[in-house]
Amino acid sequence: MADEKKIILTGDRPTGALHLGHYVGSLKKRKEMLDSGKYTAFIMIADIQALTDNAEDPEKIRENILEVALDYLGAGLSPERCSFFVQSHIPALYELPMYFANLVTMARLERNPTVKAEIAARNFEKSLPVGFMTYPISQAADITAFKAHYVPVGADQLPMLEQTREIVHSFNRIYKTDVLVEPEAVLPDDETSYRLVGTDGNAKMSKSLGNCIYLKDDPDTIREKVMNMFTDPNHLRVSDPGETDGNPVFLYLDAFGGPELFSAHCTAYASLGELKAHYRRGGLGDVFVKKLLNEIMQDVLRPIRERRLQYEADKEGVLGLLKAGTESAREQSDRTLAEVREAIGLNYFTDKGFSNAYITRGGAGGDTPNSTK
Ligand code: ATP
Ligand code: MG
């Protein structure tokens, strides 16, 4: 075989610029996998999925297409090692969900905990768009159209991967085929990054919740956001004992302040563990910890921002990258689509077996479309 590399598929909704949650939850792992040279990767800007809860505001999606592409490039995803593409220009991603929708029950969709949480967050209980309810099916199409083996995602996506695997099982069993590949989620290395909390202490940093530090934020904005972060509300005086578990400032230090960065910016403590112990005992102020986090954050985000700015100077070129990536994604997914149609038996015009069964052998009064093969 010409190309034995395993395939990665992953993507993001163009509903805003990308933030630290995307970075630790998925982008970091994508970059690591791409840089290893072991994978073929398709990275999707999920504009159709973004329409499922923004149908009345397509301008929001248009203005974020290049933003997300710039964030990818800023985060170091190399365009030589992957195809960046836009979901809306891939016909297979409209057709496959029609087939998959027949293999999923409404009850199963309604049980999906991510969908439940997202419906509640959007106050969709009374006016739920059908497209939003069925987006897990569309996500199964995104993944399987590329025969992806690996999907680097945050933990909120695990129920989606489970749903996709179920669809793959059903499809391959019913149509007696092995066309579809069962994908695996690739989670971040540390649990804090599975679902990074927001700067307000909310369970998830999310564009929709407005509690984000963006990859493109300038140094002053980063400092301001870090200094205003939520901490332990009972840690009122410096001398008070403080809680580090679940405290966003410490969670961010866990996610970003690896031992090297920590010691580069903090000489007063031998390790993050020691710093935490002091905070828990009392006698360590929030301002000290936040200043340290700000310095570390600035180090993490500086190279991303600078790389992003370079690409921002050539947006025409970035659009060209998206166009080329979209063409290659279309070719790849069209091949899968042809195999899927064949597996179901929808290939009437090209299938010798069809002519043999229903034309040559059947003749007038012979096989009807309902006769068994
Ligand atoms: P929206 O609010 O529009 O849904 P979002 O901020 O949740 O946006 P998505 O585009 O839905 O972002 O998510 C893209 C990817 O980033 C997914 O793999 C998701 O798991 C990951 N991700 C998003 N937010 C976080 C987070 N706070 N922690 C870890 N991973 C995250
Ligand atoms: Mg989301």
Image (cartoon, helix red, strand yellow):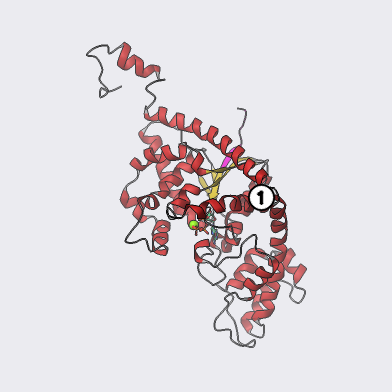
Q: Residues within 10 Å of mark 1 (few under 14, many from 20)?
A: many
How many numbered marks, from 0 up? 1
Identity of the residue drawn at 38% across and 64% down: 123
Can I make out residue 40 in this image?
yes
Q: Nearer the viewer, residue 176 or 355?
A: 355
Q: Residue furthest front?
A: 59
Identity of the residue drawn at 64% across and 86% down: 238
**Residue 3 inside the magenta-drawn segment:** yes
Identity of the residue drawn at 32% across and 61% down: 126
Q: Nearer the viewer, residue 52 or 96?
A: 52
Can I make out residue 170 in this image?
no
Please state if 72 lies on the left or on the right of 113 as rendered: right
Q: Residue furthest left?
A: 365
x, y percentage for residue 373?
A: 31, 22
x, y percentage for residue 94?
A: 43, 40
- The majority secondary structure of the magenta stretch comes to loop
Write down the residue under mark 1: 73
The kind of secondary structure element at disc 1 is helix
Residues shaded magenta: 1-8
Identity of the residue drawn at 45% across and 44% down: 140
Please name the amino acid that badge 1 sits on.
Leu
x, y percentage for residue 57?
A: 46, 55
Tell me if residue 366 comes above or below residue 25 in the rendering: above
The verdict on label 1 being within 8 Å of ligand 1 is no
Q: Nearer the viewer, residue 351 or 93?
A: 93
**Residue 219 inside the magenta-drawn segment:** no
For the N terminus, the quadrant is top right
Please state if 175 lies on the left or on the right of 16 as rendered: left
Please state if 317 lies on the left or on the right of 172 as rendered: right
Tell me if residue 195 comes above or below residue 134 in the rendering: below
x, y percentage for residue 65?
A: 56, 50
